[in-house]
Amino acid sequence: MSDTFSTIEFDKSPDGLVPAIIQDSNTNKVLMLGYMSDKALEKTKELGTVTFFSRSKQRLWTKGETSGNFLFVNEISADCDGDTILIKATPAGPTCHTGADTCFGEKNSQDTRIGEASFLNYLQKEVIRERKLNPQEESYTSSLFRKGINKIAQKVGEEAVEVVIESKDDDDELFKNEVSDLLFHLLVLLEQKNIDLDEVIGVLRSRHQ
């Protein structure tokens, strides 16, 4: 995630809010418009998912916290006056609460597979990272971080072997479960090494340009 500005002048508005335009990073479609306070912007940067200040709820509101349709941030910039924010993001599913692709009723031609893949970003940045930063005694993920990188790497190896074994059988459901286990432990390993999935995707993208 990159920032191309230093200061937003929140005090220009009596309520301390500035408009935030959300644009799809892949299709350039405008997805929605919301409002941000300084704390909402700070939370957006911290989580990597778009967080607004809800004027109706009068609290911070992360887009997707109920629906699961998060907006994963790729770039944040401001206009020339420093009182409007532009966020380029990857949506995990429809953006509008009505189920439409955008809040303006436009069809977003983005391949829906991108939305599904974005769940992996959510899993690493919101779930796995939370278990690392705020460990819970009963959490399996937290227990992996406590045991360290050797144990995590070992689990990745074990799950990879399970995938190979199950690929030779005809039980597709079991095979998909084993692949899911492998992907999960790979994300844990990436988080342990402080590497975002986005960085790995960047390597893959560079190979296919």
Image (tube, rainbow, N blue to C red):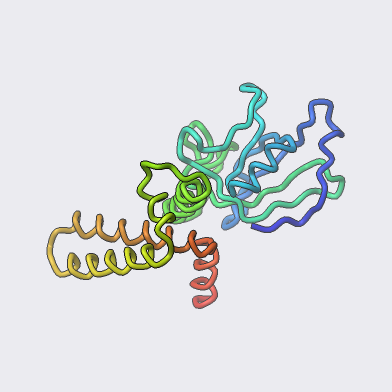
Q: Position of residue 136 (x, y in %)?
A: 43, 42
Q: Position of residue 41 (x, y in %)?
A: 70, 42
Name the residue rendered at 64%, 52% in the picture. 88
Q: Is residue 114 left or right of residue 49?
A: left
Name the residue rendered at 18%, 65% in the picture. 166
Circle count: 0
Q: Position of residue 83 (x, y in %)?
A: 82, 41
Image vertical order of residue 9 relative to residue 115, above or below: above
Image vertical order of residue 6 relative to residue 159, above or below: above
In the picture as drawn, the residue positioned furthest to the left comes out as 170
Q: Quadrant of residue 1?
A: bottom right
Q: Quadrant of residue 161?
A: bottom left
Q: Position of residue 80 (x, y in %)?
A: 85, 50
- In the picture, the quarter occupied by the C terminus is bottom right
Name the residue rendered at 81%, 52% in the picture. 6
Name the residue rendered at 50%, 35% in the picture. 65
Image vertical order of residue 171 relative to residue 122, above or below: below
Front residue of this view, candidates 132 and 59? 132
